[in-house]
Image (cartoon, rainbow, N blue to C red):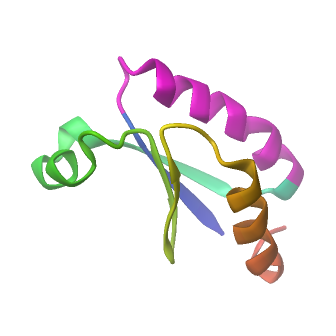
């Protein structure tokens, strides 16, 4: 399973969400794809004010701050795909 984090290097909320995901990643073994939204005009327009945004194949899990309940629910739904 891969999660995608829409990210900006200068964004403190982005760094906080990435750091908050590390223990989850260590426990559940998902891949984390970090995407710089400013490198793609389409992504920048779509996610501009929402960054950071955490996504999986089904769509948005959360934005601005890590929603641990939503993440846990999504990981449980993908239990057969991780580790």
Residue 28 percent across, percent down from the top left: 84, 57
Residue at 48 percent across and 30 percent down: it is 14
Residue 45 belongs to magenta span: no
Q: Nearer the viewer, residue 41 or 49?
A: 49
Q: Tell me: residue 14, above or below residue 78.
A: above
Using residue 81 as the reference point, say whether residue 59 is left or right of it.
left
Whether residue 30 is visible to the viewer of this picture, yes or no, is no
Task: Give the magenta-colored segment's residue range.
Answer: 8-27
Residue at 37 percent across and 39 percent down: it is 51
Identity of the residue furthest to the left in this view? 41
Q: Tell me: residue 28, above or below residue 25.
A: below
Using residue 23 as the reference point, say whether residue 20 is left or right of it.
left
If the image is split into quadrants, where does the C terminus sit? bottom right
Residue at 37 percent across and 23 percent down: it is 9
**Count of numbered circles on the image:** 0
Residue 67 percent across, percent down from the top left: 66, 48
Give the overall secondary structure of the magenta segment: helix
Q: Nearer the viewer, residue 45 or 81?
A: 45
Residue 32 percent across, percent down from the top left: 59, 50
If the image is split into quadrants, where does the N terminus sit? bottom right
Using residue 11 as the reference point, say whether residue 77 is left or right of it.
right
Q: Nearer the viewer, residue 1 or 12?
A: 12
Identity of the residue furthest to the right in this view? 27
Q: Quadrant of residue 44?
A: top left
Residue at 20 percent across and 39 percent down: it is 39
Whether residue 3 is visible to the viewer of this picture, yes or no, is yes
Q: Quadrant of residue 74?
A: bottom right
Residue 13 percent across, percent down from the top left: 49, 26
Residue 10 belongs to magenta span: yes
Q: Quadrant of residue 66?
A: top right
């Amino acid at each position: 399973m891969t999660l995608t984090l829409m990210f900006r290097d200068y964004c403190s909320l982005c760094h906080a969400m990435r750091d908050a995901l590390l223990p989850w990643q260590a426990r559940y073994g998902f891949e984390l794809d970090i995407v710089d939204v400013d490198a793609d005009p389409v992504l920048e327009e779509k996610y501009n004010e929402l960054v950071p945004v955490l996504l999986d194949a089904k769509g948005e899990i959360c934005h601005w701050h890590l929603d641990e309940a939503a993440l846990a629910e999504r990981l449980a739904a993908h239990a057969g795909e991780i580790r």
